[in-house]
Every structure is written in structure tokens, then in C-alpha cells.
Image (spheres, helix red, strand yellow):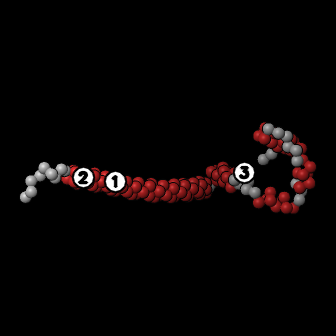
């Protein structure tokens, strides 16, 4: 697991160098770390953290290497279990993508229906505005004709 010949101080120095390279500053909380690193609460927290490497993978690989010579059926079962895991993971991913796609499709159909409704409302508004303009023009023509009739000189007309 750990490189041969390294002690705890080498690991601390390596961690500080990694911190310096990622954060672009020196680690300046050594005094706090020295006080807290052996506390029970911190140890409990460290025990609950997930490990970076899966512990089941090396044991499965080691079991496969041993079982290849002794029992071939056992190694195929272990390979099958790994396949089941990956298949389940693929199914979960597929279901997630399908749910995302269905949500996207629902939102898209809602947007399309809203757009249709807006277009219908715009047409109705335009038709109403055109009807109002035509009515105003008609009223203006009627009023103009009435004014022309009223302005006619009746003195020149014959009595019936």
C-alpha cells in the first residue's frame, strides 16, 4: 500500500507539497492538526470517510488469480458478479437518462402548447384590431356623408 522506506513525516511532507501545488500557498495550520489528529472524534470521522480505492476489487482480482489454477467455475462466478454490478449501474444510468429525457419532453411539449396558445391569442387580437379599424373607417365615412348631406344647399332644390 505505502511505498517502502517512507515514514509518517515523509507522508506529511508529501501532503504539504501537494497542498502547496494545488492551493498556491503553504499549509499554515500545523499546530491545529497536531492537536486534533489523535482525537477520538477525528478518528471516528476518518473511519467513516469512504476509501478512495474499493477494497473489494483487489480481493476479487486476487481470488481470480488463485482460482484460475484451482477452480475455474469460481472465477467465472466472480467475473459474472462484476458484470451484474456494471449492468445494474448501466440500468440506473439509463433510467436516469430516460427520466431526464421525459422531463425534457414534457417541458418541450408545454412550451409548444404555450406557443400555440400565444399565436392563437395574437391572431385573435390582430383580427379584433382589424375589425375595430374597419368599423372606425365605416363610421367616419358615414359621418362624412351625413355632413355632406347637411351642407347641401337646399335653396336650389325643387320642392316635391
In the foreground, 155 or 81? 155
Q: Earlier in the sequence, mark 3 or mark 1?
A: 3
Q: Residue furthest front?
A: 155
Q: CA distance from mark 1 to mark 2?
A: 27 Å
Q: Earlier in the sequence, mark 1 or mark 2?
A: 1
In the foreground, 135 or 131? 135
Q: CA distance from mark 3 to mark 1?
A: 69 Å
Q: Which residue is mark 2?
A: 147
Q: Nearer the viewer, mark 3 or mark 1?
A: 1
Q: Is residue 110 above or below residue 23?
A: below
Q: Nearer the viewer, mark 1 or mark 2?
A: 2
Q: Position of residue 97 (x, y in %)?
A: 51, 54
Quadrant location of the C terminus in the rendered image: bottom left
Q: Earlier in the sequence, mark 2 or mark 3?
A: 3
Name the disc covering residue 10, or none.
none
Mark 1 crowdedness (10 Å alpha carbons): few <14, some 14-19, many ≥20: few
In the foreground, 81 or 108? 108
Q: CA distance from mark 2 to mark 3?
A: 95 Å
Q: Is residue 17 above or below residue 151?
A: above
Q: Which residue is mark 3?
A: 52
Name the disc covering residue 129, or none.
1
Mark 3 crowdedness (10 Å alpha carbons): few <14, some 14-19, many ≥20: few
Q: Residue at x 73, y 54 (%)?
A: 51
Q: Position of residue 70 (x, y in %)?
A: 64, 53
Element at badge 2? helix
Q: Residue at x 22, y 54 (%)?
A: 150
Q: Position of residue 9 (x, y in %)?
A: 89, 44
Amino acid at each position: 500500500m505505502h511505498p517502502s522506506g517512507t515514514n509518517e513525516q515523509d507522508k506529511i511532507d508529501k501532503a504539504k507539497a501537494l497542498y502547496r501545488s494545488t492551493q498556491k500557498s503553504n499549509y499554515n495550520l500545523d499546530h491545529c492538526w497536531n492537536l486534533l489528529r489523535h482525537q477520538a472524534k477525528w478518528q471516528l470521522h476518518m473511519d467513516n470517510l469512504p476509501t478512495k480505492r474499493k477494497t473489494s476489487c483487489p480481493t476479487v482480482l486476487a481470488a481470480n488469480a488463485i482460482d484460475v489454477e484451482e477452480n475455474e467455475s469460481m472465477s467465472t462466478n466472480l467475473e459474472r458478479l462484476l458484470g451484474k454490478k456494471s449492468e445494474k449501474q448501466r440500468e440506473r444510468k439509463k433510467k436516469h437518462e430516460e427520466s431526464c429525457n421525459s422531463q425534457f419532453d414534457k417541458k418541450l411539449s408545454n412550451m409548444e402548447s404555450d406557443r400555440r396558445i400565444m399565436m392563437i391569442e395574437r391572431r385573435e387580437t390582430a383580427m379584433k384590431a382589424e375589425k375595430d379599424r374597419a368599423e372606425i373607417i365605416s363610421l367616419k365615412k358615414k359621418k362624412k356623408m351625413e355632413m355632406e348631406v347637411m351642407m347641401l344647399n337646399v335653396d336650389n332644390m325643387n320642392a316635391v
